[in-house]
Image (cartoon, rainbow, N blue to C red):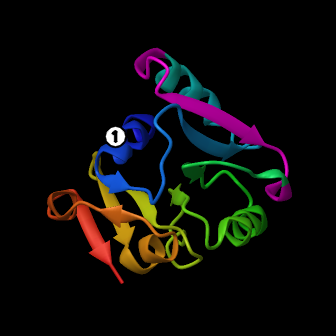
Amino acid sequence: MKARYLSLLPQYLHWPKMAATPLVIGTMQEDRGEAKYVTYLGKKSKGQFALKRFSDPKEIETCHIFFLSSAVDSKIQSEVIAQLQGQPVLIVGDSPDILEVGGAIRFKVEQNRMFLMISQPALKRAKLRADSGFLALDSVVVVD
């Protein structure tokens, strides 16, 4: 389900100077669920997405979206966020504190329904803009 949402986000968000394709989604190599994203995006994307796995936050380069799963150690999450600070990268995660530490979108599942918790300040820091129609969806919760 998360991979599907990751693949839909570019329809609703605008990067300052976004290259056409492929859109690069980064993740940490230690993310055990990463194989699901590779499989899903590989089948559905038709070349629209490329997935890059990084073993060290200092190696992170050129991504449009970076997914930080709750399986990734919180220290590594903080290092990734620090590395991407000020870059036009959408940081998405599913840990309860991802927005507090600098992420822009948190995937939250509640009663078998996916909600997107969105931090407008984090989007602004990353120089990203969300469509107003997207922000008005009932599955989207904007937090400050």
Name the residue rendered at 30%, 44% in the picture.
11
Quarter of the picture containing the N terminus is: top left
Q: Position of residue 70 (x, y in %)?
A: 60, 55
Q: Position of residue 26 (x, y in %)?
A: 64, 44
Is 17 placed left or right of 9 in the picture?
right
Element marked by disc 1: helix
Quarter of the picture containing the C terminus is: bottom left
Q: Residues within 10 Å of mark 1 (few under 14, many from 20)?
A: few
Q: Position of residue 122 (x, y in %)?
A: 47, 75
Q: Is residue 111 visible?
A: yes
Count the labels in the image. Answer: 1
Out of 130 and 144, give the one closest to the viewer. Answer: 130
Location of residue 13 with respect to 102 vertically, above or below: above
Q: Which residues are magenta?
A: 43-58
Inspect the magenta stretch and tell me whether residue 109 lies in it.
no
Q: Position of residue 41 (x, y in %)?
A: 49, 26
Amino acid type, residue under disc 1 in the picture: Leu
Is 30 placed left or right of 8 in the picture?
right
Residue at the bottom extreme? 144
Name the residue rendered at 41%, 20% in the picture.
44
Location of residue 21 with respect to 44 vertically, above or below: below
Is 23 placed left or right of 60 in the picture?
left
Inspect the magenta stretch and tell me whether residue 56 lies in it.
yes
Residue hosting label 1: 8
Out of 28 and 94, give the one closest to the viewer. Answer: 28
Is 56 placed left or right of 141 in the picture?
right
The quadrant holding residue 101 is bottom right
Q: Is residue 29 visible?
A: no
Out of 48 and 110, give the one closest to the viewer. Answer: 48
